[in-house]
Image (cartoon, helix red, strand yellow):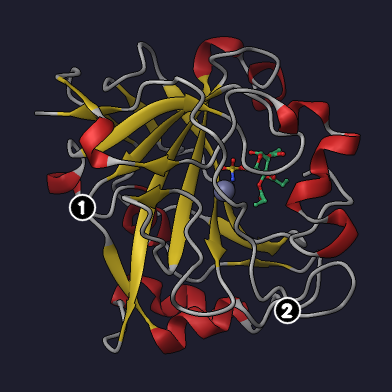
């Protein structure tokens, strides 16, 4: 991640464009998705591979989020849907808010959800993540929305328990839950064909406009308590990272599609 940006004050989102000109571009993310304005479309089936079975993974506080990467030979990938080739898993991470009424980056009908999971993939044909980010179709990010409820979501149990081990920036641990990637990358294959998709950007500096976004329509849930654990990690200045979502950006004539399976 680019180093000196934050979500408040003089390094906050409205200032990112001074150092990172692309953040002022015309194809920025996140956006508000208005269901009445979407164009329906039938894309080929979105397919996941390499998500089954256990994965060795580690979890890091990178100063901007809780991030999970794989160090397993079995790396997940996706194909189909709005993308015309194979994209390889790079990392996943979360965005949340200072209270349960906000936190998601993308909004649906102007509604904020409490948390959003981003699963980042790079185009295999380009050989590496670093090469892929130089290309305008380099990345695909899956976005999953979570609404806060009283009921804990078992899928988050192991992560939430281990967040206490990565409070400081740069902390890095091996995750004991070998099924964490299966749970997070493809939690509910049955809903996987029900998504919005549009062209946009990374939601953090350098805000590169290279992302095919795939946002699943159906929100999942997380408990208030589980969510609170995310707010306990620290950012670079040693204060709690209470929120890390970028406000929505203008759509500027772009089309948002909804897949009708
Ligand atoms: C890039 O942009 C960065 C992320 C950053 C997101 O995907 O990826 C890399 O640089 C991988 C080598 O940063 C990192 O992975 C840190 C090494 O995301 C974050 O982790 C901060 C939220 C932003 O991605 S997004 O558009 O999906 N939100
Ligand atoms: Zn993100």
Residue at disc 2, secondary structure: loop
Query: Residue at the spot x=30%, y=77% of the render?
Result: 154
Instruction: Give whichever of 186, 23 is nearer the camera.
Output: 23
Does residue 70 appear in this view?
Answer: no
Q: Residues within 10 Å of mark 2 (few under 14, many from 20)?
A: many
- Does 237 appear above or below 200? below
Classify the position of the N terminus by image quarter.
Answer: top right
Residue at disc 1, secondary structure: loop
Query: Residue at the spot x=29%, y=47% of the render?
Result: 52
Farthest residue to the left: give it: 261
Classify the position of the C terminus by image quarter.
Answer: top left
> Residue 38: which quarter of the image?
top left
Does 47 sit left or right of 119 as displayed? left
- Does 79 appear above or below 103? above
What residue is disc 1 on? 188
Residue 224 coordinates in the image, percent (x, y)? 41, 86
What residue is disc 2 on? 167
Residue 143 coordinates in the image, percent (x, y)? 41, 46
Does residue 35 appear in this view?
Answer: yes
Instruction: Give whichever of 196, 220 is nearer the camera.
Output: 196
Does 48 sit left or right of 174 as displayed? left
């Amino acid at each position: 991640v680019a180093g000196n940006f934050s979500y408040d004050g003089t390094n906050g989102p409205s200032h990112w464009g001074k150092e990172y000109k692309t953040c002022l571009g015309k194809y920025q993310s996140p956006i508000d998705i208005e269901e009445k304005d979407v164009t329906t479309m039938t894309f080929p089936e979105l397919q996941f591979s390499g998500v089954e079975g256990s994965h060795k993974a580690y979890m890091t506080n990178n100063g901007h989020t809780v991030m999970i990467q794989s160090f397993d030979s079995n790396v997940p990938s996706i194909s189909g849907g709005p993308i015309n080739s194979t994209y390889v898993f790079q990392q996943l991470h979360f965005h949340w808010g200072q209270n349960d009424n906000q936190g998601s980056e993308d909004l649906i009908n102007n509604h904020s959800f409490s948390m959003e999971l981003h699963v980042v993939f790079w185009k295999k044909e380009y050989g590496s993540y670093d090469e892929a980010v130089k290309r305008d179709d380099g990345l695909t990010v899956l976005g999953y929305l979570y609404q806060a409820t009283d009921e804990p979501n078992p899928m988050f149990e192991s992560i939430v328990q281990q967040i206490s081990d990565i409070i400081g920036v740069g902390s890095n641990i091996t995750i004991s839950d070998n099924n964490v990637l299966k749970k997070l990358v493809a939690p509910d294959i049955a809903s996987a064909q029900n998504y919005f998709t549009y062209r946009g950007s990374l939601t953090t500096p350098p805000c590169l406009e290279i992302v095919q976004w795939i946002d699943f329509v159906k929100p999942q849930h997380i408990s208030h308590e589980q969510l609170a654990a995310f707010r306990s990690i620290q950012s670079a200045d040693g204060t709690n990272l209470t929120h890390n979502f970028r406000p929505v950006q203008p759509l500027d004539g772009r089309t948002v599609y909804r897949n009708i399976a």
